[in-house]
Amino acid sequence: MPVSGYSTPQRTQPGGHYGGYPSGWGRPHPIYGYPTASLPKRSGGGVVATAIAAVFVLVVGGIAVAAGLNSASRTSDTSYSSGTEPTYEPTYTTPNTTEPAPTTEDTPTTTTEAAPTTTEAAPTTEEPTETTEQGPTQVFETADNPLVLSQLGLEGYACELPRFATDAASQDAFYRAMLPCLNEIWAPVLRQANLPFESPNLVTITNDTESKCGTIPGNDVARYCGDDLTIYMTANYYSQVEQIGPYPGRYVSTFVHEYGHHVQWLAGILPQMHQERYDVGDSSAQGLELSRRAELQASCFGGMAMGALTGQGSVDTNMARESLEDAAQRGDYPETGRPRDHGTPQNNGAWMNHGYERNATGDCNTFAADPDTVA
């Protein structure tokens, strides 16, 4: 099946989409590395949606958004049956008197007493039953996912990066240096939400590459494949097709967005969205809106990461500015005739900036946001 890809819109400034879903994304995928779970019934989504909609405001030059576990229990149940008191009741045999033949002396009778019997019931003991505490697992929810039901923030981290250059080898070295930094800031947040964490794989490609999600074109946008937990960065596309120049923040903007998809996958948000989109139809209005909500949330998570890394180590405010500007140029352009599955550039930039400013996972709950903010 061909891979869905998006060409760069004809603009005076660099633009384009973030990575779309590789081939087969509209069908259910197995959940990588963790057991599946039944889907609990949703509740309370409308209240959250209203709250987020109320705090999404526009400002000149872009949209700035203002916004304001179940842990398994260990039980021990020990019960004992009460022991019965021993019963003691002596028994006697009836005296037996025999009258002898007449004699001059009486023969006395004898009485035999039986020894008492004592029976004691031994107490029965039930071993205490113990329920083992469940480890972190994906939660297949979108708006009601524990990652976005709490206001969890990323800690600042000094990320040391090599000098950036646009050739494929230099891009790869740059991404590989940043990957551990993203792991360091996201792992504690997922664990706080009792969700699993593991680092994504990273492959920087220049030619078509096979993945568990299908073929990844080397001359198209970056991709994230949940089936193999891999970010595929397409080096030549950004340096030669979009020609975005020697501005590391523009490359990083896409990288942190794709890492945001990895966070969604680990949490269970992305697999759940994928299933819901499949159920309603990939290309239906509902299906496309679900896709936009997922893409814009990945941008919001990407903004959180940029905020946590900026001002420390190698990530300065210039790189952060470049990444935010790049996000505001990526999204759906009606003139291309492509599906509206990523969100408008204005909304994409708004959510990226929102994550950067707010640094709270709950404020990135795009699945509970007003439809206008995810158009």
Image (tube, rainbow, N blue to C red):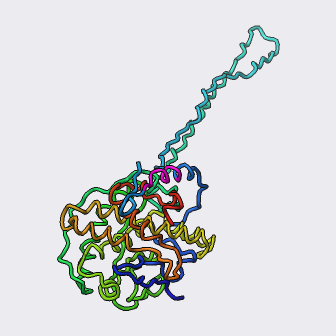
- The picture quadrant where one finds residue 8 is bottom left
Residue drawn at 40 percent across, 63 percent down: 350
Q: Where does the image place residue 255, in percent across and percent down from the top left?
A: 33, 73
Taking depth in this image into account, of 226 and 296 the one nearest to the observer is 296
Q: Residue at x 54, y 66 (%)?
A: 272
Seen at 60% across and 70% down, the residue is 285
- Residue 114 appears in view: yes
Q: Position of residue 117 (x, y in %)?
A: 63, 28
Q: Nearer the viewer, residue 254 or 335?
A: 335
Q: Kindly indicate the quadrant of the structure image that contains residue 361.
A: bottom left
Q: Which image quadrant is residue 209 in? A: bottom left
Residue 303 drawn above or below residue 242: above
How far across and down, in percent of the image, does residue 17 sit?
42, 77
In the image as oriented, which residue stretches furthest toward the top? 104
Q: Which residues are magenta?
A: 49-57
Magenta stretch secondary structure, dominant: helix
> Which residue is at 58% across, 31% downward?
83
x, y percent for residue 253: 33, 72
